[in-house]
Amino acid sequence: MKGIIRDWVKKVGYDIVRVDDGFDVALYRRTYPEESIKARRFYNIGAGSFRHPCWTNIDNRSDWYGNVFGVDSNGIEYDLLSGEPIPVADGSAELVYTSHTIEHLDDACVQHLFNESYRILKPGGTFRIICPDIDLEYAAWKNNDREFFFWYNDPTNNENLDAKMLAKPFKDASVTQLFLEEFATHTSELVLDGSEPRISDVEFHRIFDEMPYEDALDHCVSRCPLELQRKYPFRHMNWFNEKKVTRMVQQSGFNDVYPSRYRQSKVAVLRNHRFFDNTLPMLSLYMEAVK
């Protein structure tokens, strides 16, 4: 089948790089200026191992993640906790994309990321945001739906993380601690090196019984210090739902903000799941904003 597709591409004259690996440069060339493609003015913030010939990765090396750029010399090294401007010119980006990154930052850093995304985008450019949906996770906790937190029963997770960060295996954790570990990791009794005091199951129930929903979530993440996040950048220290993302993105200047879904971007190139929307769709929130 791959050979058939490749022959068809050659026949119709599309200039696609490695179509059998999912590269879709011809679509970019039909949609965007050649100058933007050559300059890779498509930016993936918190990109990790993402690679695409039209895109520039923005990420930070760390002891945990290693050299996130590999052999890609076109990446921009940038610390999302720094509060510094992203080194990209105003109004130059065609697209900005970030997937499962903002839950690793506090509100101030997320707001800065949103502000910078608005600044660097061209008028009419789109910003696509993907992150865990706290409303789905909260509903699973309320329903005692242990299977939602699927990683608790993954032997690979338990084997790889037990000695490095867990006080006890995921499989032995309560649903409450699994939920807490997912959005305010430093406060969970599951982690070895966390904020003190930790939040017990009893305290967690009391917090959510006595406080409004968002206030309870904010209280938990407020107990996640940035110094611990710098030490363990893979941990989560924030929560998001459609309401909160919309509010923060609008504060950055975006007026056209709307929910999306898995592989349902309004931007054609972002619907290629070989590159986008391929992280944990079962628990993800999808949002877009147009400058």
Image: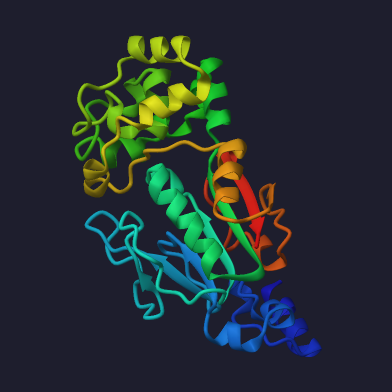
Quarter of the image holding residue 271?
bottom right
**Residue drawn at point x = 61 percent, y = 36 percent:** 243
Q: Position of residue 206 (x, y in %)?
A: 39, 9
User: Quick one: 218 or 278, which is closer to the camera?
Assistant: 218
Q: Position of residue 274 (x, y in %)?
A: 59, 62
Side (left or right) of 169 relative to 104: left
User: Quick one: 155 or 183, which is closer to the camera?
Assistant: 183
Q: Quadrant of the C terminus?
A: bottom right
**Residue drawn at point x = 61 percent, y = 39 percent:** 242
Q: Position of residue 273 (x, y in %)?
A: 62, 59
Colour scheme in the image? Answer: rainbow
**Residue drawn at point x = 30 percent, y = 15 percent:** 200
User: Eyeballing the image, is 186 above or below 291?
Assistant: above
User: Eyeballing the image, is 204 above or below 271?
Assistant: above
Q: Is residue 101 visible?
A: no
User: Quick one: 39 or 83, which is closer to the camera?
Assistant: 83
Quarter of the image holding residue 253?
bottom right
In the displayed orientation, state which residue is furthest to the right: 12
Q: Quadrant of the N terminus?
A: bottom right
Q: Position of residue 74 (x, y in %)?
A: 41, 79
